[in-house]
Amino acid sequence: MSRFTPNLPVRPASPPLFLVGIATFIDTDRKSGRPKCKVGISVPTSTLEKMKQHSFAEEKKGEMSHVDRLSELIIAKPNILSPYTAVNPLKIGASFHFYRNTSVEEFLGRFKSAFAGSHWHSYHRFQDTIRRVVDEEVLYPGDKLAFFWFDDGDMFITKNDDVRGRIFQEDINRRLLEVLVDDEKTIVKELTDSLHDNARTTRPW
């Protein structure tokens, strides 16, 4: 199982993240027959345990009155940093790997539904942040963008492992996570299916 430790400007240092789901994010390029972009979801062991519990609850859904959305469980705030605790609040990462030239506008367009019902400036703030992070009109083969969510509502954004942006608005960050991991709101069903399947069987080394 693939794992890595992101280099983020937080203390204590980020924990290792384990790959638990992967899917095509932007459809196959006709010329090459390869996806233009794939997305992978990686989590620390604390989030992996929550995913296992959620997967079990989904199986028993008919017997339970309520099952929290996975995004709600992930962004819960049990880790309150204090002089008596030293738990890194990193909860989940999403990495977008590009295999063919992809315009920034095409990438942004995949997230438009996440902002349905929100104030117009939320989507524009997200757009402006991504444009600053990429700093070009096109994402090229080999480029990688990544989002890292924390339990305090913050999100770091990296390009090719270099931290280039940060979004502090919790509503935006929740919406972005929901459309990747929640069954009801997903824009990538292949990804949520992958998460369900792998959460039950993944064991960190």
Image (cartoon, helix red, strand yellow):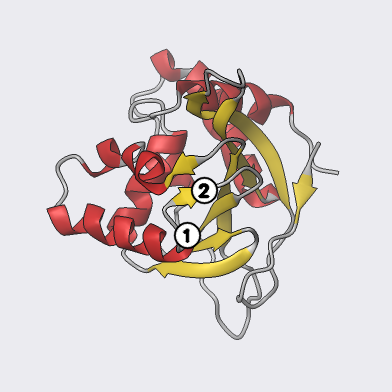
Q: What percent of the width, then of the height, locates residue 119?
A: 13, 53
Mark 2 vs mark 1, CA separation in Å: 7 Å
Q: Amino acid at mark 2?
A: Leu
Of callouts 2 and 1, which one flags the residue occurring earlier in the amino acid sequence?
A: 1
Helix, strand or loop status at disc 2:
strand
Q: Nearer the viewer, residue 190 or 60?
A: 190
Residue sitting at the far bottom? 83
Q: Residues within 10 Å of mark 1 (few under 14, many from 20)?
A: some
* Quadrant in the rendering for residue 10: bottom right
- Labels 2 & 1 near each other (Cβ < 8 A): yes
Q: What percent of the width, then of the height, locates residue 138?
A: 47, 49
Q: What percent of the width, then of the height, locates residue 33?
A: 60, 18
* Lateral position of residue 73 relative to residue 143, left or right: left
Specify the label residue 139 is tagged with: 2
The residue wearing badge 1 is 134
Helix, strand or loop status at disc 1:
helix
Quadrant of the image containing the C terminus: top right
Name the residue: 45% across, 53% down: 75
Q: Is residue 10 above or below residue 41?
A: below
Q: Amino acid at mark 1?
A: Val
Name the residue: 62% across, 67% down: 162
Q: Is residue 133 above or below residue 142?
A: below
* Lateral position of residue 66 relative to residue 92, left or right: left
Residue 75 in view here: yes
Q: Is residue 68 above or below residue 93?
A: above
Specify the label residue 29 is tagged with: none
